[in-house]
Image: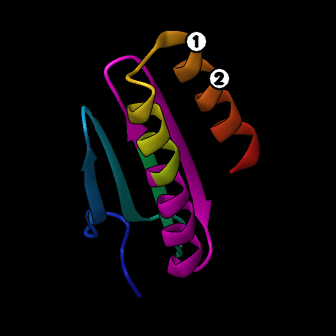
Amino acid sequence: MPNAWTEKTETVRRRDVGKSIVYLERYFFEEDWRFYIDASGPDYRVWKRTKGSEDRAVEIYQRYVFWVWLIEAFGHWYPATRFLTWVMHKTI
């Protein structure tokens, strides 16, 4: 069984989308592997923690990549970025 003190956070996937970064990390917590998905740009940050299968975490990661690509398509125009990050938060 993995030990929380010896196991390190592992980056499973990472993608640069224009000025933004989306990544998926796996970490150990309370006898279970959990996942942390983060989308960061110059003027926003949206993140989510999930427990469960790695397939589910990869699905969430792919959704984040899509929404970040859409934010990049709007050129980080602040009202669009704010609206799209709100949609990301509500739908994912």
Name the quadrant containing residue 51: bottom right
Q: Is residue 49 magenta?
A: yes
Q: Assess whether residue 81 is covered by the magenta stretch.
A: no
Residue ID for mark 2: 83
SS at badge 2: helix
Position of 5 with respect to 35 (left or right) is left
Extreme right residue here? 90
- Residue ID for mark 1: 79
Name the foreground residue: 80 vs 85. Answer: 80
Q: Position of residue 17 (x, y in %)?
A: 29, 45
Q: Is residue 19 above or below residue 61?
A: above
Residue 9 visible? The answer is: no
Please determine whether, in this image, residue 57 is positioned above or below residue 42: below
Give the farthest residue toward the top.
78
Question: Whole-percent x and y of residue 88?
Answer: 64, 40
Q: Residue at x 45, y 14 (%)?
A: 77
Q: Position of residue 20 (x, y in %)?
A: 30, 36
Residue at x 51% of width, y 66% of height? 34
* The N terminus sits in image quarter: bottom left
Residue contact between numbered discs 1 and 2, judged by CB atoms under 8 Å: yes
| CA distance for labels 1 and 2 | 6 Å
Left or right: where 80 falls relative to 37: right
Can residue 84 be seen here? The reply is: yes
Q: Position of residue 11 (x, y in %)?
A: 27, 63
Residue occupying the point 51% across, 35% down: 46
Residue extent of the magenta highlight:
39-65
